[in-house]
Amino acid sequence: MKTIILMIAIMSFGIAYNQKGIETAEIKTSAQCGMCKERLEEKLNYTPGVKFAELNVETAVLTVKFKSDKISKAEILKVINDTGYDADDTKANKEAHENLPKCCQKGGHSKH
Amino acid sequence: MKYIILFIGLLMCALIQAQTLTGKVISEGEKGEESLVGAQLIWQKSQAGTVTDVDGNFKFEEVSELPDTLLVQFVGYHTLKIYFDKIPEKGLKIKMKAGTELQAVVVSAGDDKLLSFMDPIGFEKINQSELKKAACCNLSEAFETNASVDVSITDAVSGAKKIQMLGLDGVYTQMQFENIPIVRGLSSSYGLGTVPGTWIESIQITKGRGSVVNGYEAMAGLINLEYLKPDEEGPLFVNVYGNIFGRAELNLHSAFQMGKEKKWSSLFLVHGSGLFAENDRNGDGFMDLPKSYQVNVFNRYKYFGEKFRTQFGGKFMYDEKIGGQLGYSPSQDKGLWGLNMRTTHADLFAKTGFLLNRPSASIGLIFQGKFHEFKSVFGTVPYYGRERKAYFNSIYSDEFKNGDHKIKAGFSFTYNQFDQSYNDSVFSRLELVPGAYFEYIYSLKEKFSLVAGIRGDYHNLYGIFFSPALHLKWNLSKTTVLRLSSGHGYRVPNAYADNMSKLVSARQWIITESLRPEQALTSGATFIQKFKIGGRESSFSADYFYTHFFNQMILDMDQNPQFIFVSNLNGQSFSHAVQGELNLEVARGFTIRLAYKYYDVRMKTNNQLQQKAMVPKHRGLLNLGYKTRNKKWLFDVTANWVGVKRLPGTSSNPIEYQRPNESKNFVLLNAQITYVHKAWEFYIGGENLTNYIQKDAIVASDQPFSQYFDASMVWAPVAGVNVYGGIRFTIKKRRVNN
């Protein structure tokens, strides 16, 4: 019993999240494949202020949970643009977009 | 590399949605394109599968859950893995490249452990993310979160660990490195400590008799280790580890790919470790863990051509352990009881595959050479062992009628020279074993399969070994599978080398007769049911295995606590093993594994059929894992419950050297936290967190030179809480974008 309580205590330490000042944004992106998902999520997960980012490849919607006192939504859009993707109404950074693998660039999927 | 991970960029990015996936599988040869008949296509997640028709076409009526990865397999061709987010609007054209694989094709999941669903012979897989749940140190920790393999401490001095499957000693489980037998012969007792944990890419565990292709020694199970692959690893990996017992460990890996088309690749694995401090927390005057030093180097090469592939490499290891009473040193005689073991091990391997003219036929050749030398002193008794081995195996495989019928056949040859001495007695043995096998595999689409294998070996000392094996599988539904297996196995025992931990005692060994090969029939049934909780994969599995020994080397420690009587089986010996396991993902990233095992292992010792000493009747495992959604934090907690074990009797000893006839129930609790930051991983963890220690583990620790001394009566940890921490740094291989 002692053991089980200890296990639960250790686990809940992991699950417990501080929810203060946290906002969630849903951003429509131009991402279109699994490679894009990996790239975007890694980029955003390592952006200070972002709790986590998850891309739904089917809808191209990126869900971002972030601390609003550390980063704004506009700054998050800029990070996405700088990675090479459109985000809501802001356009991708052209150079970053061209550096993406062919298949991840806009229209890369519709050539066949 | 088992798979060629092919990123068909255009496919991956396909946008337009359709429920039906159609396509054609073709081979790209010198004569141009040819359609492949009978190529297998399996979705990794949903496990739905199909086979191409006479024109090479295939069709999936309904592709349910995307993203998923489609595996395309055909004997004689490199397996393709294609990732889909969406179903493409047009039909697929899948090009396969010719090439032969020596390993059986394995369907692997992206994460954690997997229960195989489609393979004719069932197995469980432990992959890297599972292996990382126990950061320390070598193969014996790799099974910590797995319920099928039990790990226990062998004695109170050497610190060695040994595995058990089906309640049977680890020697009855055949251990392989990429289908080459290892950790056998003289290395069976301490072999797990010679494989550093970071070297392992994945482990496949088969319960019961495995395939006949790899020999006659798999009785309780077959464990195949896949080491890291030279064409998949990056230029640098570093792991630094330290714990509060004073153990430090360094692992360096480096791989590079050579040539214009990167057909050559090489991988170096370097391991150095040591335990530099003397620990005695239980206050019995003996080190809880031995001081140790190990240097371990492995280098492998791979050539990856169109029609020809080869891999070769070698390993060198030197390991020294110094244990026993505090202050013991092998170079000075201070009148202290000590244990000193020095192991030198070197081996070489080569594997070559050729494609024949028929696209489905291939030949694989495996060669291994091994030198193993073990010099030791247990108190005042020296033991020396040297093993020289050469091993050859060949595999011809072919298939007919769209892959419904497959065959594997080949010859093997083993040369094994054993030279051992214990105290004043010297014994040597030369084994020459030519063998041949034939295996037939029948598959009825994804519904049913049968693997029937026969094997015959001629042993120069013991005559003919006949070891057949049969495996049946039914996919009762898309989420239910039932397997049956039965097989006969043999093993030539080595009294001392198989039971090294029993040398850590004053017991006198009496080998009452010349030992014959061990022989057992293992049969079992496995049931797997998959289901979903809120769209997340979960599974329940249950199995039962029965092992009947026709002959076994019996170590009788029950007659008299001052003796070990070694003999052939004279009576009954069997094992009934039942296991139930539940794997759940209860919330996103939060997994639970719960397992219960019941072992009824009995053999005749001291003239009565009784529960085997040191094997608990009941065992349980609870593993909780949590990964945060940003993938930066990983939490893992494992509890192992070990039930009561029968202990060899000590009632004839003086009262202070008597021990109970039964051990106590106990729980071992381990936990680990990992933080990932880009290329860096930081981990901290604890073992035996409830600090469970067996009291008075060593009998007569105050009189180690008396006839009552016995450090082999260990049923629980002798060292208390361990806290460790470490850092991993990885530079991944650069991924080529198509």
Image: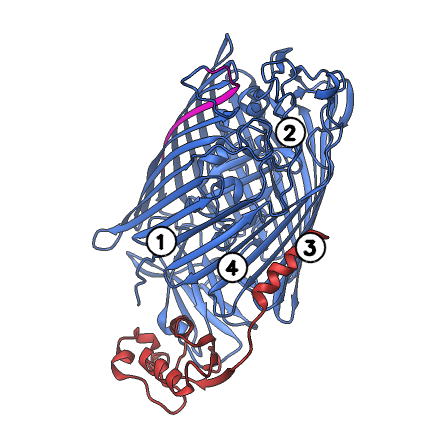
Residue B587 lies, in percent from the top left, at: 62, 68
Q: Which residue is mark 1?
A: B232
**Along the polypeptide, which appears first: circle 1 or circle 4?**
4
Indicate the colour of chain B.
Answer: blue
Q: Is B326 rendered above or below residue A55? A: above
- Which is more toward the observer, B74 or B459? B459
Residue A4 tag number: 3
Specify whether disc 3 shares its chain with disc 1: no
Subunit ID for the residue under disc 2: B
Q: Identify the residue at the far top of this view.
A: B424
Residue B86 at least partly seen: no
Q: Which residue is mark 4?
A: B111
Distance from Cα at disc 1 to Cα at disc 4: 17 Å
Residue drawn 40% across the image and 40% down it:
B364
The residue type indicated by label 2 comes to: Ala
Q: Is A43 rendered above or below residue B468? A: below
The residue type indicated by label 3 comes to: Ile
Distance from Cα at disc 3 to Cα at disc 1: 40 Å
Indicate the colour of chain A.
Answer: red
Q: Is residue A77 magenta?
A: no
Q: Which residue is mark 2?
A: B697
Residue B596 at least partly seen: yes
Q: Which stretch did the figure color magenta?
A: B334-350
Say left or right for B269 vs B245.
left
For the residues labelled 1 and 2, say whether their Cβ atoms are less than 8 Å apart: no
Distance from Cα at disc 2 to Cα at disc 4: 40 Å
